[in-house]
Image (tube, rainbow, N blue to C red):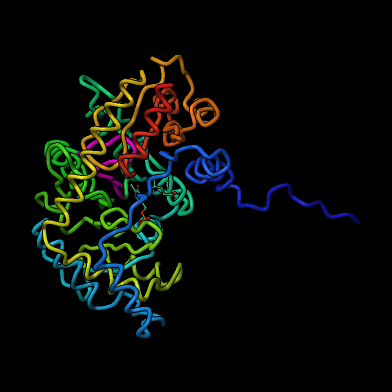
Amino acid sequence: MTTSTPADPLVERMRPFGTTIFTEMSALAVRTGAVNLGQGFPDTDGPPEMLAAAAEALASGANQYPPLAGIPALRHAIAAHEQRFWSLDRDPDGEVVVTAGATEAIAAAILALCEPGDEVVCFEPYYDSYAASITLAGAVRRPVTLRPEMGGRYEFDEAALRAAFGPRTRLVLLNTPHNPTGKVFSVDELALIAELCQEYDAFAVTDEVYEHLVFEGEHVPLATMPGMRERTLRISSAGKTFSCTGWKVGWATGPARLVSAVQRVKQFLTFVNASPLQPAVAVALGLPDAYFTEFNARMRANRDHLTAGLREAGFGVFPSYGTYFVTADIRPLGGTDGVEFCRSLPARSGVVAVPTQVFYDHQDAGRHLIRFAFCKRPDVIDEAVRRLKS
Ligand code: PMP
Ligand code: GLN
């Protein structure tokens, strides 16, 4: 008797998810020697105080399992940071949990809160792990499209957002400042989302990993809107704010019942992580305001520099109000398909970018759009622009 071997052992629901675009494009950059403005990671180290604290922790025995919720010093630092910047009151014992990056917090939140068939309202283009985590949970995504409108600002249609809510809506997954568009959701937009969450008795899970990277307008956590604290789980991470994307130290904060739900799932995903890095992130979160304003100013200068360079190179560039990404329209350069464009860009120009169409369910809305990261040294941005212009 012969047994047939299925071509792909992967569970069916995960088969539509290939290798992430970030992995594909970073590998392409390494293979071709192109300047990598694709995957969002800085090329400069974070604050020296943080790095020294990590080295010290590593050398002084902080190398075994930390407590499930995270070490007390870090939980206190997370709570103090939320109080300092966003006036949110958190009990470090019960309203804060440390996770393996924001990615684990997002996955654990969705797995913890969604029954199969429950619906998750999100905005597209969405960060790629959202779709995968929703699918892993057996939940259904209800994407609302962000489109560049007047002046290039990405907007959504209020009627489309209202239509995305229904009796099966379990939660809204909101990323602001928004990757990849650089959109910063306005107070009016947040008020509408808050109103709908309350009308449909839905939770909100907010991804605020770019909370310190707003260049125009202000960052407002949805949890601070009237009626939202009790139904919002706020997620962030050290990766972006402290230029340590490889550390994977993230957190979720919110009312104890939501944090507890996340913790009960996360204990079976990773259990815990990053023992010697936790005290170091606690140090970083407590740095004076000057650290945060200088970091923001540096990234704003990079944004201006890259935006101008991309315009000179002939792209249609949309203003980036936050994050460390800027999106561009390839049609002025004769491009029609962002995936094709980005796959051939290293050979043509020696630069790597990321096509954003892979972050949409309605791919036509993003077919002509690509994303560049500007969390790079000015000379690297210069070199990328020089190559793109030629
Ligand atoms: N959310 C968004 C919007 C991101 O851009 C990223 C990427 N870095 C993450 C979550 C993941 O964060 P972490 O590396 O802390 O898991
Ligand atoms: N968040 C990073 C970005 O958007 C990539 C993270 C990853 O590679 N998964 O570019």
Left or right? Give the position of 67 relative to 84. Answer: right
The answer to whether residue 162 is seen in the rendering is no
Residues rendered magenta in the picture? 171-184
Residue 389 falls in image quadrant:
top left
- For the C terminus, the image quarter is top left
At 21% from the left edge and 40% from the top edge, which residue is drawn?
Answer: 300
Residue 237 falls in image quadrant:
bottom left
Residue 247 horizontal/vertical position (percent): 38, 63
Q: Is residue 86 above or below residue 19?
A: below
Q: Is residue 280 above or below residue 234?
A: below
Residue 28 horizontal/vertical position (percent): 55, 40
Main secondary structure of the magenta stretch: loop
Residue 157 horizontal/vertical position (percent): 25, 27
Q: Is residue 239 above or below residue 54?
A: above
Is 46 included in the stretch rendered in magenta? Answer: no
Residue 164 falls in image quadrant:
top left
* Front residue of 335 and 32: 32
* Front residue of 33 and 245: 33
Left or right? Give the position of 301 relative to 315. Answer: left
